């Protein structure tokens, strides 16, 4: 579906915004899905600022789930938490919406009438993680390590499980954190090396806010692990060779 915008004055006022006439595949939008696609196009491209709200709200008024979810995202990212919350609750089967609700409970949000609650935050983080949101997995890992939420096993086990889940979704910080757990808490250099190498090879690492740190630390630990392997192999060769032969002194 292609979305177009022009200054053709023909057509209904319902599909115009500030003098611009919007079309979908060359015709004026008539369905909620078409209004949503226009709103999504405006949001993704940054063209016609403000138009995305106009078209998304038209779609949302008919109960269009994706439009409601995107409006909740826009409200949240722009700090309009009071209007974001009902939209996020409506979209609670969205991993992004569940993560935002978790964050609001984690830190509390008087503007939206939300009292800080780690119990509620954990519930929403788990919901978001189960829906596939790696950011929720990473926060859960930290909460387990800090012993801030109940754990049925050792906190490190729960944390590693969450970091590995994020790592399998190619999240560089998940790869890095899993490597750190393997190296420091489990003294498992082989599994740590696999995760460090994944972080180094991940093209998303350099785009992450902590990308430089993760890259430098991962490379440093890989060198250490490589040196340890070399020293171990050398020692094994010595052990296999056994003690040197003595000369005959008698």
Image (spheres, grey):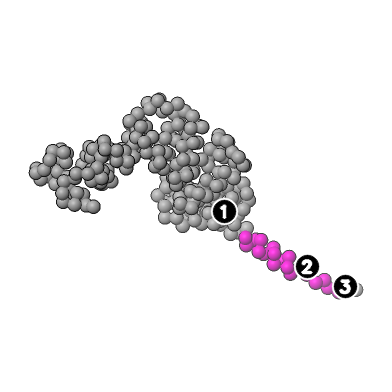
User: From mark 1 to mark 3, how far is it between C-alphas?
Assistant: 51 Å
Membership of 239 in magenta stretch = yes
Q: Which residue is mark 2?
A: 243
Q: Report x, y in % for residue 111.
A: 37, 26
Mark 2 burial class by Cα count in 10 Å: few <14, some 14-19, many 20+: few
Picture layout, residue 176 above or below residue 92: below
Q: Which residue is mark 3?
A: 249
Picture layout, residue 119 above or below residue 20: above
Mark 3 burial class by Cα count in 10 Å: few <14, some 14-19, many 20+: few
Q: Residue at x 32, y 35 (%)?
A: 75
Q: Are marks 2 and 3 in contact (CB under 8 Å)?
A: no
Q: Earlier in the sequence, mark 2 or mark 3?
A: 2
Residue 241 figure quarter = bottom right
In the rendering, which numbered label is found on residue 48?
none
Q: Earlier in the sequence, mark 1 or mark 3?
A: 1
Boundaries of the magenta span: 229-248
The residue nearer to you, when weighing 20 against 93, is: 93
User: From mark 2 to mark 3, how far is it between C-alphas?
Assistant: 17 Å
The C terminus, quarter of image: bottom right
Membership of 124 in magenta stretch = no
Badge nearest the viewer, 1 or 3: 1
Q: Which residue is mark 1?
A: 192
Left or right position of 74 against 226 = left
Q: Residue at x 48, y 34 (%)?
A: 121
């Amino acid at each position: 579906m292609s979305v177009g915008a022009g200054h053709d004055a023909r057509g209904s006022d319902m599909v115009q915004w500030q003098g611009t006439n919007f079309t979908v595949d060359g015709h004026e939008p008539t369905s909620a899905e078409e209004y949503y696609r226009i709103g999504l196009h405006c949001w993704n491209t940054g063209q016609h600022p403000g138009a995305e709200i106009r078209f998304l709200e038209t779609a949302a008024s008919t109960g269009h789930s994706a439009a409601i979810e995107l409006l909740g995202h826009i409200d949240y990212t722009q700090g309009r938490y009071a209007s974001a919350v009902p939209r996020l609750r409506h979209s609670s089967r969205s991993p992004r919406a569940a993560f935002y609700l978790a964050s609001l409970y984690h830190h509390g949000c008087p503007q939206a009438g939300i009292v800080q609650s780690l119990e509620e935050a954990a519930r929403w983080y788990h919901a978001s993680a189960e829906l596939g949101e790696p950011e929720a997995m990473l926060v859960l890992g930290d909460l387990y390590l800090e012993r801030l939420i109940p754990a049925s096993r050792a906190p490190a086990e729960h944390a590693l499980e969450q970091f590995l889940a994020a790592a399998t979704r190619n999240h560089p910080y998940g790869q890095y954190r899993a490597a750190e757990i393997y190296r420091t808490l489990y003294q498992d250099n082989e599994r740590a090396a696999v995760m460090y190498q994944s972080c180094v090879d991940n093209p998303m690492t350099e785009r992450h806010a902590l990308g430089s740190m993760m890259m430098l630390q991962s490379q440093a630990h890989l060198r250490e692990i490589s040196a340890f392997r070399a020293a171990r192999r050398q020692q094994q060769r010595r052990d296999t060779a056994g003690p040197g032969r003595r000369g005959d002194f008698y």
